[in-house]
Amino acid sequence: MNKKPYFKSGGLVLLLGCGLTFATFAQEVNPKFPLIPYPTSLTPGKGAFALTADTKIVSASRRFDNESVQLNLLLQGYLGKPLKKGVTEEHNIVLKYDASVTSPEGYNLTITSNKIVLAAKEPAGMFRGVETIRQLLPADEHSRVLLKKISLPGVSIADQPAYAWRGMHLDVSRHFFSVAYLKKFIDLMALYKFNKFHLHLTDDQGWRIEIKKYPKLTEEGAWRTFNNQDTVCMKRSKTNPDFVIDPKHIIHKNGKTLYGGFYTQVEMKGVVAYALARHIDIIPEIDMPGHMMAAINSYPFLTSNGENKWGPLFTTPICPCKETTFEFAQNVFTEIMAIFPSQYIHIGGDEVDRSSWAIADSCKTLMEKENIKTTAQLQSYFINRMEKFFNAKGRKLIGWDEILEDGISPTAMVMYWRSWVPDAPIKAGKNGNLVVMSPGDPLYFDNEPDRNSLNAVYHFNPIPAKLTAKEARNIVGAQANTWSEKIPTENRADYMVFPRMTALAEVLWTNKKDYEGYMERLKMNFPRLDALNVSYRLADISGLVEQNVFTDQAILNPQKPIANLTLRYTTDGSLPKSTSAVLNGPLVISKNTFVKLAAFTPMGRRGDVYDLHYKQQDLAVPVATFTAKPGLLCNYYPGSYKSSRLMAGKAGEVITVDSVAVPKQVKAPSFGLKYQGYLDIPQDGIYSFFLNCDDGGILNIAGREVVDNDGPHGPFEKSGQVALKKGLQPIGLDFIEGGGGYTLKLKYSLNGAQPQDIPSSWLKH
Ligand code: ACM
């Protein structure tokens, strides 16, 4: 994965307001139907069905036995005992075979006061319908107070997914996750109608699945001493307990403290069965030829020269020029295929440092024999040969988009991740390869979420613009990936995944945009996530700026995003606790102040802590009027910079721009930009600026630093204010991109209004 450190910020409003009736897609939400993903078609009906312990489940076909059991288990959580089987439809729940439902995951659900009818052709469709019923039931699924009667609202739903691949990925190598957590994750995927769970089982930092033929892979490869990623977590654990390395996965052996763990084959078969009962395929990934350090440590014959080290970016890969490598890989995948019945098996194929192949005798010999000219072709030789092996076993190969380079068979599936190679999915789609979209921005859920993340995921379009309608059919869906370098606990994983996963669920199942409706339904989903013990990221507190200024006084008066949250704050620099002062009215600030603010749930769980600085400032005086030209000057610095403050020397090119955006002329993967000129400020006031960048940026206005969002990181927004008089005010914005795809957005707001783009008429030089 893209190894960048990330920070956080926060703040976004949940829109309230309930409509009473609601047919299909509209801006009103019927509180009776808090469904995510929203069904393809939903028509509210009259009345309600009263479900009691006397209700029976009627299912004439054995075909839906599993789904009937799942439904019964769910209802038992509320009623305290399982429902009996019935024969008559009246007053009961009927699971019906319906050959007219064409989609394998489609279903129809009709609820009247008389009965509930759930109809599907396939068990998978029936199961998705059971999960819709689940979301219509009370939030507390394992209520300690049993219910005598549950009322289900009258409705008619016809539903089917927009995309066949609705995936979530979890990296269990960098940090390890228990079997219980995998099951929790699968259950939550089922709740939101996902159907592919991609497990990244091996990497440099740990081998997590038992392979009987090579026992050292887990005896040795599943354990490591603390590494620099743990150090980052340990530092952050000082202010956030979710970063304390999970003690469940720490052992002491031969005088050493080791971190790790692995799944036995029996354990993993149990997880696979649990997922299959929920119609979720587990896609195992054994990442090779790169990312193999944990295996090579124990089996050094796998590399070209027996070496196993970190290069400038990646570790030494296994050697594609030795038969012993293929023997190992095939033996490993044979055991993997016996555990995982999924049609697709993931071979990784990403981030390979091929330099050891370039100097190996074994590779020289193979290249001559096979007429291979480059080491990139060696990589495709390896992948293509493994694909033949997979196919001979009746399976299909999937790999990260690097497998496209230098030749790929059209039958391999490509998982697109490199946002900075936008042509990769287009090339794959045109080549006839099936493609799963998982671009880093916005689908790497290890990127620290901020107030813009949910919106970005919700508005993600899996279909790249340059594909024809026919080629677009090769895009089978999308997936969010969660790399765990800086996710050492289950609570932290919950936080990174939720609620973003619910936004992706709606993109992939419903594929119609109703963001406001979604946000409202999300609010209604939080109590269920609370009941399921999900440590999701709380809704943002809206309208906050990190670096505030005032001339006489400022007023901090944030609104609670959800009524049952409590806002608490401190002014002494300490972290807000559940006993800190409550903020439930305006706080007047008339001297320099540092406020730490956080929302707390009724259970006392704390959300993001907002650091709000307040500084007194005079209105800055503009420069003397002169005849300025339109646009800003943008100085382009080719090269790689770790900080915006490190750009030095002469600019390569000076480009005049009419907006704060990376100019088209800039093609390099890493570069720096310095924007200079003036903002033609229309009236005196306190201006807020919102700088969203990947990587770093620093904004200065009127000679004052307004936003420091510097350093290498993923896209996130930071904000600051400056007090300005009307007239020409100098602006300087320094921005760096270290490689891996950039974001640069600058918005402003005056006196707390909605942030908006800076008009190009304000830009002068
Ligand atoms: C990846 O993030 N290296 C697939």
Image (cartoon, rainbow, N blue to C red):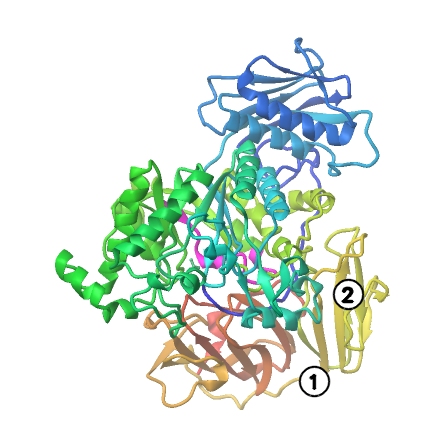
| Alpha-carbon span between mark 1 and mark 2 | 20 Å
Check the image and report above or below for 388 versus 12: above
Q: Where is ligand 1, by quadrant?
A: bottom left
Query: In the image, 368: left or right of 274?
Result: left
| The stretch drawn in magenta includes residue 499 | no
Q: Quadrant of residue 648?
A: bottom left
Please, which residue is most extreme toward the top here?
A: 88
Q: Residue at x 24, y 64 (%)?
A: 375
Can residue 591 be seen here? The reply is yes
Which of 569 and 514 lies nearest the eye of the viewer? 569
Q: Which residue is mark 1?
A: 617
Mark 2, Cα crowd under 10 Å, few <14 / some 14-19 / many 20+, is some
Secondary structure, mark 2, is loop
Which of 744 and 298 lies nearest the eye of the viewer? 298
Numbered marks: total: 2
Q: Which mark is residue 557?
A: 2
| The stretch drawn in magenta includes residue 437 | yes
Q: Quadrant of residue 44?
A: top right
Can residue 21 be seen here? The reply is no
Which of 700 and 265 lies nearest the eye of the viewer? 265
